[in-house]
Image (tube, rainbow, N blue to C red):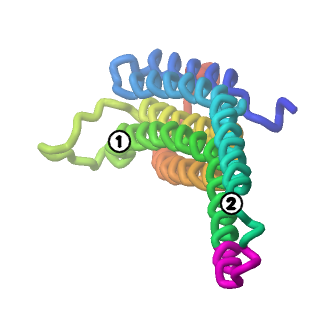
């Protein structure tokens, strides 16, 4: 089902191509280094996903050994407790049954915790990967924050504290578009984690990342919509 799942290799190819596009148009801008960082995060996410999909056999073997050891302890304790004498004292019998029930409940809770241990380990790895993505999303937002289309207006008067701006309408539009594309790639990387670990908690965390990136992308596209482009000649084609 190639069109029902995300392919990390294709996402990496897209990120690398975007890195080259940003470097060609804005070689001296910090956004080019951000694009390089997104490519590195794509490779890291690919490696994480490949490690998360298969079972953690070592951990499963450890859990199985713990369960077998616990069962052996129960059998050993049951073999040395004189259960045939419990019927002679009603009070002692009730206490013994109550203690047995409590022990079984605690053992069941411990077994459930051991079975879920693998999922907890994978969720921790996913959380680390999503934290890196969240950080780079905010870095991308910092790069587009001062790119205000109002500065293109002939009536705009900068102050002494205004940042240096040397982009025309076309360059500013491409710059903002690249920021939106970088945010889109981070959203796809987050979706890779949800695809590898189908867990409700992971899906919620991934959704938060996607919502964050989408909200920032909407802000960027509002800026792009404010830019007044002059119509280019028909024979001219703007490079990507």
**Number of numbered labels in the structure image:** 2
Element under label 2?
loop
Q: Residue 44 in the image: x percent, y percent?
A: 54, 25
Residue at (46, 42) in percent of width and height: 131
Residue 81, disc: 2
Q: Residue 159 in the image: x percent, y percent?
A: 15, 46
Find out whether residue 215 is within the magenta segment: no
In the image, farthest residue toward the right: 1
Q: Is residue 23 left or right of residue 70?
A: left
Q: Split into 4 quadrants, where in the image is the C terminus?
A: top right
Q: Residue 106 in the image: x percent, y percent?
A: 62, 62
Query: Of 144 and 35, which appears nearest the observer?
Result: 35
Q: Residue 177 in the image: x percent, y percent?
A: 52, 36
Region rendered in magenta: 86-98
Q: Main secondary structure of the magenta part?
A: helix
Q: Can you say whether 15 is above or below 196 in the image?
A: above
Residues packed near mark 1 inside 10 Å, few (<14), some (14 to 19) or many (20 plus): few
Query: Of 69 and 113, which appears nearest the observer?
Result: 69
**For the residues marked 1 and 2, what is the alpha-carbon distance in whole angstroms?**
69 Å
Looking at the image, can residue 228 be seen? no
Element under label 1?
helix
Q: Can you say whether 12 is above or below 173 in the image?
A: above
Q: Can you say whether 94 is above or below 142 in the image?
A: below
Q: Nearer the viewer, mark 1 or mark 2?
A: 2
Residue at (67, 54) in percent of width and height: 77
Residue at (72, 28) in percent of width and height: 7
Looking at the image, can residue 43 be seen? yes
Task: Identify the residue position indicated by label 1 in the image.
Answer: 142
Residue at (45, 37) in percent of width and height: 132
Query: Of 111 and 230, which appears nearest the observer?
Result: 111
Q: Split into 4 quadrants, where in the image is the N terminus?
A: top right
């Amino acid at each position: 089902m190639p069109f029902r799942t995300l392919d990390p290799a294709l996402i990496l190819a897209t990120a690398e191509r975007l890195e080259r596009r940003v470097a060609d148009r804005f070689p001296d801008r910090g956004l080019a280094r951000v694009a390089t960082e997104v490519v590195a995060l794509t490779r890291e996410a690919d490696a994480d996903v490949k490690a998360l999909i298969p079972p953690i056999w070592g951990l499963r073997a450890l859990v199985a050994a713990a369960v077998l050891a616990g069962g052996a302890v129960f059998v050993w304790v049951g073999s040395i407790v004189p259960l045939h004498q419990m019927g002679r004292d009603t009070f002692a019998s009730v206490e013994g049954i109550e203690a047995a029930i409590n022990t079984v409940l605690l053992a069941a809770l411990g077994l459930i915790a051991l079975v879920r241990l693998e999922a907890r380990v994978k969720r921790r790895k996913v959380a680390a990967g999503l934290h890196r993505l969240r950080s780079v999303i905010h870095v991308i937002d910092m790069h587009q924050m001062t790119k205000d289309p109002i500065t293109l207006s002939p009536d705009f008067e900068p102050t002494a504290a205004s940042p240096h701006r040397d982009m025309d309408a076309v360059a500013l539009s491409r710059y903002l578009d690249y920021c939106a594309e970088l945010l889109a790639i981070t959203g796809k990387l987050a979706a890779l984690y949800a695809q590898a670990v189908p867990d409700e908690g992971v899906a919620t965390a991934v959704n938060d990342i996607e919502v964050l990136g989408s909200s920032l992308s909407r802000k960027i596209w509002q800026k792009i919509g404010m830019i007044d482009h002059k119509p280019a000649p028909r024979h001219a084609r703007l490079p990507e």
